[in-house]
Amino acid sequence: MTNVAETLHSVLDPAGAHAQQIVSLWDLTIWICAAMYFLVVAFTVGLLLKRRAPSGPSDRALKQGLIVWTLAVVAGLAVLGVASVRTDGALAAPFGDAPLHLRVTGHQWWWDVEYIGGGDLPGVRTANEIRLPIDTPVRISLASSDVIHSFWVPSLHGKRDLIPDRPSEIRLEPRRIGVFRGQCAEFCGLQHALMGLTVIVSSRAAFDAWYERQAAPAREPTSAHARAGRQAFMDAGCATCHTIAGTAASGRVAPDLTHIASRRTLGAGTLPNLRGQLSAWIADPQHIKPGNRMPAIDLDAPSLQAIVAYLESLQ
Ligand code: CUA
C-alpha cells in the first residue's frame, strides 16, 4: 500500500489553521502539566532532605508549601480551563461565507465527495479524495447515509461526527501544500478501519486545473479495447450503482467513477490505484474488503481486462 502509507497524518504536525489551534492547546497543556510534575518532585525531594535534618520540617514550612501548591494547581487548571474554552470557541466560530462549499456523505465504507457549484462554478462529484487550494477557507457539509461516521483529517482539524438525519458542518483552512490522510473516527461496522480519505492540498492554479478536468464528462475511449471495456461495464451491471458522467451509467449508491484514474487509492484508501490492484478489486472485492457493498461479478478474463483498460482511461 505504498501510496497509502505516504499520506501520513499527525495531530502534532498541523497543516491547517484549526489543527494549529488544537496543537497550541496541546503544547500549553504539556507545559503546565510538566511544570506541575516537576513541582511535585521538587517538593517531595525537599521534604525528604528536610526529614533527614535533626529538626525535621516545621509545621509552618509544611503549611506554606501546601498553600503554594494549592494556588499553583488552581492557577494551572484555571489557565487550562480558559485556554480550552477559547480554543473550543475558535474552532466552533460561526461559519461566514467560504469560497468553496463541499458536501461529504459517509457510507459504509466510503466517502462521497461533492463540490457544490453555483454561479459560473460547475459542481463536481468524486469519492474518497478531497482536493483543496492552499490558504482558502472551505465549508464542508457533513451527512451520513446509514450509521454514524466521523470525519477526521488530523493534520487539518479535529473530529466531526456524521449523524444520519442530523446535518453538521466543518470548516477547513489548509496552510500547507501536501497530501494528508483522513480516517473515519467512529466505529461504523466491519470495515470501519478501511474507511480512509485522502486530502490533497495544492496551489490555487493546480487546484483550478484539477477542478476543470473533474467538471468535464468522462473522456471518450480512444482504443478499441477501452471501448469494449465501456460496453462490458454497462453489460455487467456496474452502471446500476456507479456514475460515469457522459455515459448511461448514473447509479448513485457507489463511488462516482467519472475520473477514477485521477485518484490515488481504491476502496477508500484500501489499495493504491494501480492496474493490478484495480483488476483484483473488480474480480473479488469481497476478498480485499470483506462485507463491503460491492458484489463480485462473474466476468471472463477478456471482459475484466477491457473494463480495467476503460477505467484506467478515465483520467
Ligand atoms: Cu465510517 Cu467508521
Image (cartoon, rainbow, N blue to C red):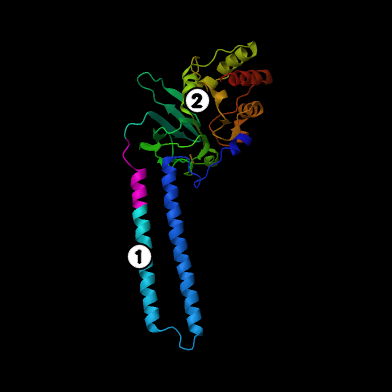
Instruction: Give whichever of 290, 313 is nearer the camera.
Output: 313
Image quadrant holding the C terminus, namely top right
Image quadrant holding the N terminus, namely top right
Q: Which residue is drawn at 35% across and 65% down?
A: 74
In the displayed structure, does residue 117 sit left or right of residue 34? left
Whole-percent x, y for residue 297 in the image: 60, 25
Mark 2, residue position:
206
Most common secondary structure along the magenta stretch = helix
Q: Residue at x 36, y 70 (%)?
A: 70
Q: Looking at the image, is 141 positioned above or below residue 124?
A: below
Q: What element carries label 1?
A: helix
Instruction: Give whichever of 135, 310 is nearer the camera.
Output: 135
Q: Does the magenta stretch include residue 191?
A: no
Contact, mark 1 vs mark 2 (Cβ under 8 Å): no
Q: Is mark 2 on a helix, strand or loop?
A: helix
Kind of residue at badge 2: Ala
Whole-percent x, y for residue 199 in the image: 50, 34
Residue 289 is at least partly visible in this image: no
Residue 48 is at least partly visible in this image: yes
Q: Looking at the image, is 68 positioned above or below residue 153?
A: below
Instruction: Give whichever of 22, 297 is nearer the camera.
Output: 22
Q: How many marks?
A: 2
Label number found at residue 297: none
Q: Is mark 1 within 8 Å of ligand 1?
A: no
Q: What stretch is highlighted in magenta?
A: 84-95
Q: Is residue 87 magenta?
A: yes
Mark 1, residue position:
74
